[in-house]
Image (cartoon, rainbow, N blue to C red):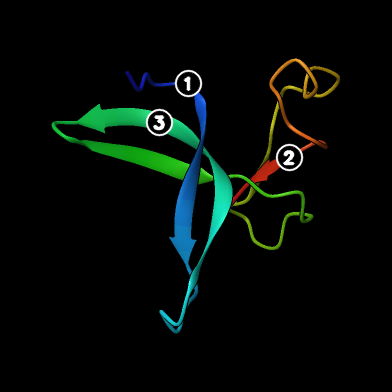
Amino acid sequence: MILAGEFWLANIPYTDQSASKKRPVLVLWLDGADAVVAAVTSAPPRSATDVPHQVAGRWVARCLMCPAVTP
């Protein structure tokens, strides 16, 4: 069962829809059968809406390979 606040892997399609790649996402909330998620990346913030995770130092406990940013 998917719960808000959990990290999951999702197939994220490339912009041109030519393929997809498994990427980590943070489940924000559930909307019926859909899950609203935020992408998680190790890339530095690129815009004002990119937010560094407040789990610094706890990323290993969250099963992430490195500190993350949610665009």
36 is higher (above) or lower (below) than 2: below
In the image, what residue type sits under mark 2? Ala
Rendered image quadrant of residue 1: top left
Q: Which residue is mark 1?
A: 5
Q: In terms of depth relative to the viewer, which is nearer, 71 or 15?
A: 15
Rendered image quadrant of residue 59: top right
Mark 1 secondary-structure assignment: loop
Q: Determine whether label 3 and label 1 are within 8 Å by CB.
A: no
Mark 3 secondary-structure assignment: strand
- Percent x, y of residue 5: 47, 21
In the image, what residue type sits under mark 1? Gly
In the image, what residue type sits under mark 3? Leu
Considering only order in the chain, which callout, 2 or 1, is on the residue closer to the N terminus? 1
Q: Residue 65: which numbered mark, if any?
A: none
Considering only order in the chain, which callout, 2 or 3, is on the residue closer to the N terminus? 3
Considering only order in the chain, which callout, 1 or 3, is on the residue closer to the N terminus? 1
Residue for point 26% across, 29% down: 30
Q: Which residue is mark 3?
A: 28
Q: Kindly report the distance in space between the C-alpha atoms of the residues bearing marks 3 and 1.
A: 6 Å
23 is higher (above) or lower (below) than 60: below
From the viewer's perspective, is 69 left or right of 57?
A: left
- Percent x, y of residue 46: 70, 62
Residue for point 77% across, 56% down: 43
Rendered image quadrant of residue 64: top right
Q: Which residue is mark 2?
A: 68
Q: Kindly report the distance in space between the C-alpha atoms of the residues bearing marks 3 and 2.
A: 16 Å
Residue for point 43% across, 31% down: 27
